Amino acid sequence: MTSTELPAEAAARRELAACYRLFDFLGWTEMIFNHITLRVDSGPDGPPHYLINPFGLHYSEVTAANLVKIDVDGRDLDASGHLVNQAGFVIHGAIHGARDDAHCIMHVHTTAGCAVACKESGLRHDNFYSAAFYGDVGYHDYEGVTTGVEERPRLVQALGDKRSLILRNHGLLVVGATLPEAFQRLWMLQRACEIQLASDAGLGPNRTIPTEVLERVPATRARMNVDREGNARKMFDAMLRRAGIRPEAL
């Protein structure tokens, strides 16, 4: 997707604000912390700009109007007066700057995600959802609270060309070419972590999935168009309806 194909900023603001409200509905919030960022067009010759939540607001308080437009360094481009958690944007800014396809980045500290991130084995590809991430998950070792730009090259290297990143001892991160695509990916990754924890709590050994089966999963998903915008959009819009969230009202 090129910059000229990105949604207009007003539409992007409504969609992102709706996504913050949906995260609240799903319980994926962390007080006033964590971020969902979305790239917006800055003109044919301008550098990319990004929308991010104002620091100090709960996700349930985010609106299209109070989202802050920033550059890759986290600077408030519109002098909105809202605070931006620049330390939190270290991770997002690194990946946005390195990956042209990372139009949307979602980072969460869900209980299941953090728990799997704390396990030495990380995410095992032994359940229906985790199988879909075979070969598409990177790992970044914990270096403390991510506040310094010196960590950015290592974050980028850990993600590589993958679309999901487990920040060890920390949490989950996904990228998407669109916001609905990123949402679908995060929902599946969260489900994979929840099921792994549940299966570990049961008696007896976990059953593995043969490698030859796992290697067929990406091609199968591609044939089914599971990761494409159409299906991801249907899922995202359905969840907005379920939560009673109307983007045009935000």
Image: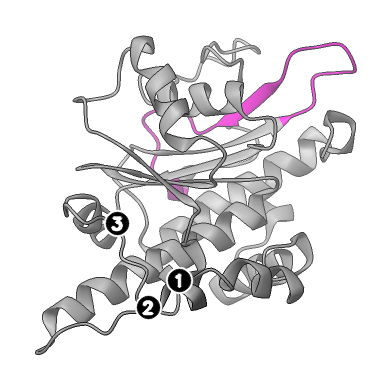
**Is tag 3's residue or tag 1's residue first in the polypeptide sequence?**
3
Amino acid of disc 1: Ala
Residue 66 vs residue 37, the one in the foreground: 37
Q: Mark 2 Cα within 10 Å, few/some/many (few <14, many 20+)?
A: some
User: Label 1 belongs to which residue?
Assistant: 131
Q: Are marks 1 and 2 in contact (CB under 8 Å)?
A: yes
- Number of other residues with Cα within 10 Å of mark 3, as a class: few under 14, some 14 to 19, many 20 or more: many
Q: Is residue 129 magenta?
A: no
- Looking at the image, the residue that sits furthest to the bottom is 203
**3D distance between C-alphas at marks 3 and 1:** 16 Å
Q: Quadrant of residue 197?
A: bottom left
Q: What element does badge 1 sit on?
A: helix
Residues at badges 3 and 2 in contact (C-beta under 8 Å)? no
**Does dot 2 land on a helix, a strand or a loop?**
loop
Which residue is the site of mark 2? Answer: 127
Residue receiving disc 3: 113
- Magenta stretch in the rendered image: 40-60
* Label 3 vs 2, first from the N-terminus: 3
The image shows residue 132, relative to residue 58, as above or below, that is below
**Foreground tag (3 vs 2):** 2
Q: CA distance from mark 1 to mark 2?
A: 6 Å
